[in-house]
Image (tube, helix red, strand yellow):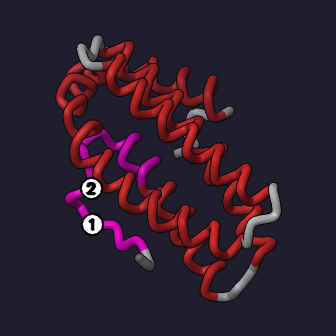
Amino acid sequence: MAYFEWNTSYDIGVDIIDSQHRRIADYVNGLDEAIKSDDKAAVFDLMELLKDYTFDHFAFEEQLMERAGYPLLDAHLVVHQRFRAKVNDFEYALRSGDDPIGVARKIRNELTRWLIQHIQHEDQNYAAVVRKALKKESSWVSAALTRIFGTETRV
């Protein structure tokens, strides 16, 4: 796998979540650029950014689903937890001296596949429930963004 070409089939119709997903795709593409330029330092930097942002995204998304009363929240939490463990394994491989470019290829390939599948299936499943809840509680989004990301405008 190479460059992650974003297209509208990955949008779930929840603007704040769609923009966060696009940001994760941008980090994946940053890894692709680091691989192509053999920039090991960039791999470490991008991995840290990717991990932090993805975990913050998960926290925001989980709170959003909980607030919306999404009935399959527990199953979604399990999927997120498994992915957090995978990301932590990748980070461990990097920190343990594995070839950074090789690890970056694995991260790029697995994350691209996982993100597409996750968005088009699990995330698409909660979209309608969340859209309905957001119409009623738009002020909650600003507070949650500030609490999780440190600013209400960070996507």
Left or right placement of residue 85 versus residue 1 in this view: right
- Furthest residue to the bottom? 37
Q: Residue 146 has which mark?
A: none
Q: Which residue is mark 2?
A: 10
Tell me the residue at 62%/80% (across/down).
35
Q: Position of residue 141 (x, y in %)?
A: 45, 25
In this view, 54 is above or below 99: above
Q: Which residue is mark 1?
A: 7
In this view, 124 is above or below 7: above
Label 1 secondary element: loop
Q: Position of residue 129 (x, y in %)?
A: 21, 23
Label 1 crowd bin: few (<14), some (14–19), many (20+), radius 10 Å: few
Q: Position of residue 120 (x, y in %)?
A: 23, 48
> Contact (CB < 8 A) between labels 1 and 2?
yes
Tell me the residue at 50%/30% (across/down).
81
| Callout 1 amino acid | Asn
| Callout 2 amino acid | Tyr
- Quarter where residue 65 is shown: top left
- Residue placed most toward the observer, 9 or 2: 2
Tell me the residue at 67%/88% (across/down).
37
Tell me the residue at 52%/45% (across/down).
155
Left or right placement of residue 66 versus residue 27 in this view: left
- Quarter where residue 8 is shown: bottom left
Q: Which residues are magenta?
A: 4-21
Count of labels in the image:
2
Give how far apart the Cα atoms at labels 1 and 2 are.
6 Å
Q: In which quadrant of the rendered image does the N terminus lie?
A: bottom left
In this view, 132 is above or below 149: above
Left or right placement of residue 132 versus residue 147 in this view: left
In this view, 100 is above or below 63: below
Left or right placement of residue 41 versus residue 117 in this view: right
